[in-house]
Image: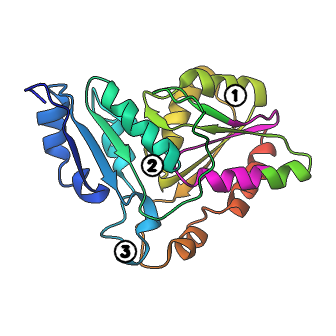
Amino acid sequence: AMGGKIPFATTYGVFIAGRGWDQIRTTICYANLNVKIAGMHGGISVGPDGATHQALEEIALMRVLPNMHMIVPCDAIEGRKATLGASQVSGPVYLRFTREATPVFTQETDEWQLGKANLLRAGSDVTIIGCGPVLYEALLAADELAKEGVSCRVLNMHTIKPIDADAILAAAAETGAIVTVEEHQINAGLGSAVAEVLVKHNPVPVEMIGIMDTFGESGSPEELAIKYGLKQKDVKAAVRKVLGRK
């Protein structure tokens, strides 16, 4: 990076963000070097590899670092856009990728900009803010809730840092309630980042879906998503709960 190149480093997210944290902090972020880090196998999608290989904390580890940018693409199309976008921003960037083949629900024609959330679905009763492949479950939940007369806005918050505070505050003002969805620890993840914005400006009711302060375990990605409450039924339940608090 100091020689003018743009290095991309990649391996399991749990290792590069965890074991490499001190070097990322002191060597890369402190010097604001133009280094890109791609953490693979993010979340519980590693499945049978179990808790030792399931990265559930790297959003927290990376977003706390000064100068770091944090991106969580939701599908293969957005993954390509995010990688290109990372190469075009000056400074450290962490990209969080999953392992499994996941549904593709964005379009090549969708605009992508670092720090700007994408509206996946318009709605007026509640806003679901998510990142990563688990957003697909949020969209399924929004479709089901629409049949019940509940209008859900769905935001793809692909950039965790810098987070799109304008989109969050608009959602709070226009829908009055927010649900966050992430395949990551609730503590210090996307939900916390959203709440930090709201508590300063417009503290509307919030419900958070994610890993509840526990480690992962071995199992298929589907089994683990069910166990840890990351399916559409869990999103629907959170929406109903937050609507009851409006």
The disc at residue 187 is 2
Classify the position of the C terminus by image quarter. top right
The answer to whether one can see residue 72 in this image is no
Q: CA distance from mark 3 to mark 1?
A: 37 Å
Mark sitting earlier along the chain (3/1):
3
Q: Which percent across, then down, holds residue 54?
A: 37, 65
Q: Residue at x 71, y 50 (%)?
A: 139
| Residue 219 located within the stretch drawn in magenta | no
| In this rendering, position of residue 40 left or right of residue 241 | left
Which tag, 2 or 3, sits closer to the chain's start?
3
Frontmost residue, 47 versus 233:
47
**Label 3 vs label 1, nearer the camera:** 3
Residue position marked by numbered label 1 in the rendering = 172
Marks 2/1 in contact by CB < 8 Å: the verdict is no
Q: Secondary structure at mark 1?
A: helix
* Part of the protein shown in magenta: 120-142
Dot in front, 2 or 3: 3
Kindly identify the amino acid type of the residue bearing the numbered disc 2: Asn
Q: Which mark is residue 145?
A: none
Name the secondary structure under disc 2. Answer: loop
Instruction: Please determine whether, in this image, residue 126 is positioned above or below residue 89.
Output: below
Query: What distance separates the C-alpha of mark 2 from that of mark 1?
Result: 21 Å
**Contact? badges 3 and 1 (CB < 8 Å):** no
The 10 Å Cα crowd at callout 2, few under 14, some 14 to 19, many 20 or more, is some
Where is mark 3, residue-wise? Answer: 50
